[in-house]
Image (tube, rainbow, N blue to C red):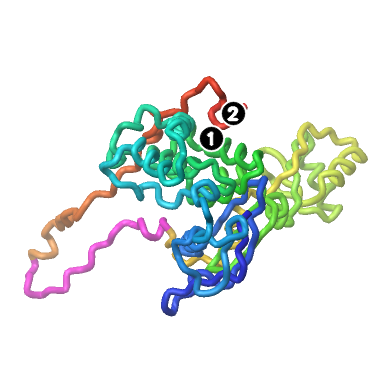
Amino acid sequence: MIEVSGLTKTYGAKRAVDDISFTVQPGQVTGFLGPNGAGKSTTMRMILGLERPTSGTALVEGKPYRKLASPLTTVGSLLEAKAVHPRRTGANHLRAMAATHGLPKSRVDEVIDITGLSSAAKKKVGGYSLGMGQRLGIASAILGDPSVVILDEPVNGLDPEGVIWVRQMARFLASEGKTVFLSSHLMSEMAQTADHLIVIGQGRILADQPLEEFLNQAGDERVLVRTDEADAFAGVLQREGLRVDPHDGGLMVHGNGRQVAERAQAEGVLLYEISPQHASLEQVYMAMTQDSVEYRSADPAAGLAPHQPAPDTDAGQGAHAADAPVDAPASTGSVPAAPAAGDDADYTPAHSSQQTPWNQEEK
């Protein structure tokens, strides 16, 4: 269990975390969401004793991190995957960690196999891809078989297979009664992984509730209806005071599904589809945090408008200046290409003789 009470952190005049309190319960996956600069990483660092709180407490299994007798077997974490000596091999990095807590070499071999690092374990970490660095970081986090696991952006850089594997691993750890606390900016993935959500914005807690309750905050109950008598049925519903909008070849009805079905039955209208529509995690999250975004992006359409050269106002250039072609300015650098998908696809979790739920194919 993780218990945070009245936690505050200031840097000069900047209050990064502002008197927050929450509890991360064992036996479930708790997602930690918030815009960039909201205080997520600072909070995680204070839980792990890497930042000293200005005030308040952060306890792991009832104790501050610094007072844990065996930190590696109590809490495992991934905050910065590349925080490893680049000239050390992945295997030697894990062996050095294991030696600090008297863990056997067999445990190192086990987590290497679980995380799909077998073919890269003897390579120097400096040559790892982003995805392989993430796998090494996760291997470090689970090395001591801890009761608490904290993962900051664990799927960053992973290919689709790796993303699914992290989801399965998080669920399995929670099913074993462990406390799983993870952050991610991938809303679709968080919606499939988390049981409970904590949302932070500008250093304050905005939500702390089960995923289902969080999604229900949208409050707009809607059903998608398809019928061969769409126009007539839309008129019936509108006379009932319901809002009806055309949507994807059907009708989006703002109302209760049972009410819509009963109305169709009474009117003798055949419905060949009626499906409840729920707001996505991304939609609810964006609505909740819209006033808590510190780094707000500009409209890309405005930013990418064609450049119009300024008129020449230098009279000394003479008449020829207006007729002279304007050369494009020399590039000061190129926009980096997006990384190719699946840069860690060569390193997939091996299927050992003792299967674990996170290296089985998702059904």
Q: Helix, strand or loop at disc 1? A: helix
| In the displayed structure image, the side of residue 28 where residue 166 appears, left or right | left
Q: Position of residue 67 (x, y in %)?
A: 52, 60
Q: Identify the residue shown where x is 37% and y is 59%.
A: 303
Say which of 92 and 259 sits in front: 92
One can see residue 184 in this view? no
Disc on the earlier residue, 1 or 2: 1
Identity, as a three-letter code, of the amino acid under mark 1: Ile
Q: Quadrant of the C terminus?
A: top right
Task: Please tell me whether residue 338 is drawn above or below residue 55 in the rendered image.
Answer: above
Query: Real-space Cα distance between discs 1 and 2?
Result: 8 Å
Question: Is residue 311 rendered magenta in the image?
Answer: yes
Which residues, given as a range, are shown in magenta? 300-319
Front residue of 153 and 172: 172
Q: Which mark is residue 164?
A: 1
Q: Residue furthest right?
A: 266
* Residue 297 horizontal/vertical position (percent): 43, 61
Disc 2 residue crowd, few under 14, some 14–19, many 20+, Cα 10 Å: few
Q: Nearer the viewer, residue 336 or 262?
A: 336
Q: Contact (CB < 8 A) between labels 1 and 2?
A: yes
The residue indicated by pointer 2 is: 362
In the rendered image, the residue lying farthest to the top is: 353
Local crowd at mark 1 within 10 Å, few (<14), some, or many (≥20)? Answer: many
Q: Which secondary structure dominates the residues rendered in magenta?
A: loop
